[in-house]
Amino acid sequence: REWKKMGRGTEGYSYDQGNVAMDEEDACKVEKVYTTDPEIEDKIADAIGDGSAPLPEVIETLLNLERVNRLAAAAPETTRICVAIAEVCHARRDWEALSEAVVLVSKRRSQLKQAVTKMVQKTMSFLDDTPDEKTKMMMLTTLRDVTAGKIYVELEGARLTRMLASMKEAKGDVAGAADIMQELQVETFGAMDRREKTEFILEQIRLCLEKGDFIRAAIISKKITSRALKDDELTDLKLRYYALMIRIHVHNADFSEIYRAYLARYDTPGIKENEQQGQHELKLAILFLILS
């Protein structure tokens, strides 16, 4: 902007301090006003082209478009571009490029949380299309690194952790699977619903038992209360919980607690109505009551 010459004591030169102050205030404003770009899909299509351009060139073009919208705080446009980057990498079956793109986008300055969340979710939907286990493991590791320490993608991080633990257990690495699952304290995750949270904790207990760590399994089991399992929608989880608790109590030779666990299973809706199963649970409860 043009400033008037400020002559020190020179005639014919003056400036309005009030106007200058107002101009400086306007110049310092950083808030940007934007509207949804109706042409964003066309711009993305132009950047991708007909598929003949090299993938690095396409990604670079999309990243430049993403930068413009990100600095303008245009959340819908930025999110759509980030998802498009993941989609074009998947369409080209370039998993290395997809892995690098997710990391790059998540680390860009002033990156929008919504953009990172949607790109992570979109990339997770591609995991079943990976050509081999090594590639899937690479993508899982990358996504877990991206979600680590970010509250807004804690739910996705927990799901990725469980997927990775399942892969390790399938390969025979039960201890590794248990250690990975124990890294997360899902009881503090606000984005995770009660059922999924309970299932995650039950899986932590089960892996500890498979590993032979009964002490840690007993500690983790305290995160689930009997009151939380009274919901009729959690009947299956209640049965799983008490089955795991019976394993812990059998290891500790605590017959009175085994009796209470079997009695709780007997009192579960659906068990009493099943005469055969109900009698089985009740007989075991009575047996361990006598032994105690």
Image: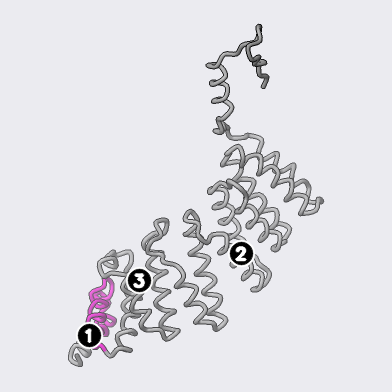
Marks 1 & 2, CB-CB < 8 Å contact: no
Label 3 sits on a secondary structure element that is: helix
Say which residue label 2 marks.
142
Q: Position of residue 123 (x, y in %)?
A: 61, 58
Whole-angstrom CA distance, mark 3 to mark 2, is 31 Å
Locate residue 34 relative to residue 131 in the image: left or right.
left
Image mark for residue 285? 1
Marks 3 & 2, CB-CB < 8 Å contact: no
Label 1 sits on a secondary structure element that is: helix
Does 225 lie within the magenta span? no
Q: Is residue 222 above or below residue 158?
A: below
Q: Which residues are magenta?
A: 254-281
Q: Earlier in the sequence, mark 1 or mark 2?
A: 2
Amino acid at dot 2: Thr
Locate residue 67 relative to residue 212 in the image: left or right.
right
Amino acid at dot 1: Ala
Image colouring: one colour
Query: Which image quadrant for residue 1?
Result: top right
Residue shown at 70% from the left, 63% from the top: 96
Image mark for residue 237? 3
Label 2 sits on a secondary structure element that is: helix
Amino acid at dot 3: Leu
Whole-angstrom CA distance, mark 3 to mark 1, is 19 Å
Q: Is residue 203 above or below residue 108?
A: below
**On the rendered image, what quadrant is the C terminus found in?**
bottom left
How many marks do you count on the picture? 3
Residue shown at 66% from the left, 10% from the top: 10
Q: Which numbered disc, 1 or 2, marks the residue closer to the eye? A: 2
The main secondary structure of the magenta stretch is helix
Q: Position of residue 276 (x, y in %)?
A: 28, 82
Q: Earlier in the sequence, mark 3 or mark 2?
A: 2
Whole-angstrom CA distance, mark 1 to mark 2, is 48 Å
